[in-house]
Image (tube, helix red, strand yellow):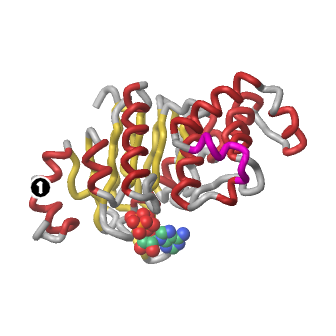
Amino acid sequence: MNNAVLHVSDVQKSFGGLRALTDIELQVEKGKTHAIIGPNGAGKSTLLNVCIGRLPPDSGTVTFDGHLITGRPPYEINQLGVARVFQTPEIFPDLSLLQNVMVPAFAKRDGTFRMSALSSLEKETDLRDEAEKLLEDVGLLQFYAKLASSLSRGDKRRLELAMCLIQHPKLLLLDEPTAGMSRHDTNRTIDLLKQIKERGMTKVIIEHDMHVVFSLADRISVLAQGKIIAEGTPDEVRGSPRVQEAYLGGAH
Ligand SMILES: Nc1ncnc2c1ncn2[C@@H]1O[C@H](COP(=O)(O)OP(=O)(O)OP(=O)(O)O)[C@@H](O)[C@H]1O
């Protein structure tokens, strides 16, 4: 695939005697949404952690946008344009929603952020306008002055999404972005992620909810027991007997 922005090649990862990832090959095309699905414990989060530098692979390489990123620290990979929404939201609980969204943009622009600079955030009117727009996009603008700790788990994930989007990443990695959300909020998040696709951002999404996967994915890779057992368009994956047997339980 010539237009691949993310290229995972021959990656292996074990935890002690457990082989979490075996012979992983993954190419994610620029501007596309690539879903990684698979049963619990298949290795999906491990693969994402390898891609963002949180876990070193035992062997193999990850290339992003022409840069070899294997072994680089997470902040360097982030500076290259990779952002991630985590399974457990990583937010600043004691800051307001608006401050939460402004801090990553400020840190990215200036290379660092100190809490002592918090008061000067208020003067960043352009950033503030953008942060408010993103809070509106994720449906949280009405709570902009509240502390992030007061949000429900689903709302914290939407806040974290806004914190990623303000960094204008080239690649957005989403680990179960709709977990803990109501169906209404899930559909709202799907609509938001579709809009982001229209803006040309590449996305990798791990998701258990097949409604979300089939609403968003251009391509799907199926992981089972640390191996990619199928890869293709949603229709190809849906029709694959191997996937139905290994992942969907045959009857589905
Ligand atoms: N830090 C770790 N130390 C030891 N084992 C780990 C570690 N992280 C993951 N594992 C194991 O590696 C395997 C893959 O885990 P991983 O979390 O990547 O799966 P997953 O597909 O994301 O699962 P889920 O859908 O439940 O989040 C599992 O057997 C898990 O117990």
Query: Which residue sits at x=9%, y=60%?
Result: 241
**Residue 20 visible within the image:** no
Q: Is residue 104 above or below residue 183?
A: above
> If the picture is divided into quarters, which one holds ligand 1?
bottom left
Query: Which residue sits at x=28%, y=50%?
Result: 221
Q: Is residue 211 above or below residue 242?
A: above
Residue 203, located in which quarter of the rendered image?
Answer: top left
Residue 165 as seen in the image, left or right of residue 217: right
Q: Nearer the viewer, residue 173 or 125?
A: 125
Quadrant location of the N terminus in the rendered image? top left
* Secondary structure that dominates the magenta span: loop
Tell me if the residue at label 1 has its CB under 8 Å from ligand 1.
no
Q: Is residue 85 magenta?
A: no
Q: Position of residue 86 (x, y in %)?
A: 54, 55
Q: Is residue 146 magenta?
A: yes
Label total for image: 1
Quadrant location of the C terminus in the rendered image? bottom left
- The residue that disc 1 covers is 240
**What secondary structure is marked by label 1?**
loop
Q: Position of residue 156 (x, y in %)?
A: 58, 54
What residue type is disc 1 on? Ser
Residue 120, located in which quarter of the rendered image?
Answer: top right
Q: Is residue 84 above or below residue 93?
A: above
Q: Position of residue 49 (x, y in %)?
A: 51, 55
Region of the chain picked out in magenta, as a range: 140-147
